Image (cartoon, helix red, strand yellow):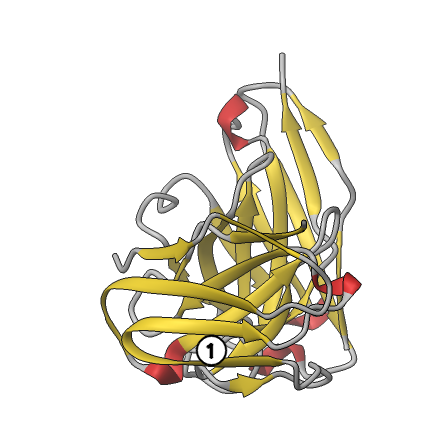
Amino acid sequence: VQLVQSGAEVKKPGESLKISCKGSGYSFTNYWIAWVRQMPGKGLEWMGIIYPGDSDARYRPSFQGQVTISADQSISTAYLQWSTLEASDTAMYFCARHRLHGRDPRDGLDIWGQGTMVTVSS
Amino acid sequence: EIVLTQSPGTLSLSPGERATLSCRASQSVSSTYLAWYQQKPGQAPRLLIYGASTRATGIPDRFSGGGSGTDFILTISRLEPEDFAVYYCQQYGGSPWTFGQGTKVEIK
């Protein structure tokens, strides 16, 4: 069971970006996937979650409208995307799987991706 | 939003000592929905405890969790060299899910 994330990105302010998180070794459709931000030297911030089975996505209010979380169950991959990056988006982004399968989103995160470092700089 | 406040910010201890980490919530959290994670430099977090007191798969029994309501505790009974890391609590009972700011356990 693992989540493998796409590689590090270096972008300019105003550019768009989509990073990915591919699951394997389990039924990707039936487990919520969360995205977690970690700014340099800082703690963990829960951004939102998606249920790949029906693409039900839920966001932390501060991230609503700033990012889009999506999933393609046919290729067991979840995505986090930005239409307009800002320097303040510079961070490590982790995807993580909920511990239990099913529609209840209240659960801990037991499988983590390795993280994708996003650097936004002019 | 439920704010989780962890204390202390840094805990300086020696291997073999006992570590007690605190996580206080701004409003009551069901113990069913409280987790603890360990993060080492350059690594993803690792789930230690869920449901406030249940160890995740493969977690040694020197790690234990407890508490209820607004006050939760993670205890490491005897610190091993590999336990020096940052620890985060997380609540997932009230949306948005939130993390505490972390407690760093460092070698004294």
Q: Visible in this render: residue A101?
A: no
Q: Residue at x 67, y 49 (%)?
A: B108
Dot 1: few (<14), some (14–19), or many (≥20) neighbours within 10 Å?
A: many
Image mark count: 1
Q: Residue at x 47, y 48 (%)?
A: B9
| Quadrant position of residue A105 | bottom left
Q: Where is residue A15 in the image (x, y as percent from the top left)?
A: 58, 24
Left or right of residue A97, residue B67 in this image = left
In the picture provided, is B90 more to the left or to the right than A7? left
Farthest-out residue, left:
B27
Quarter of the image for residue A91 reads top right
Residue at the disc numbered 1: A107
* Quarter of the N terminus of chain B within the rendering: bottom left
User: Chain ID for label 1?
Assistant: A
- A99 is higher (above) or lower (below) than B101: below
Frontmost residue, B70 versus A108: B70
Residue B28: give x, y in percent of width and height: 22, 73
Helix, strand, or loop for circle 1?
loop
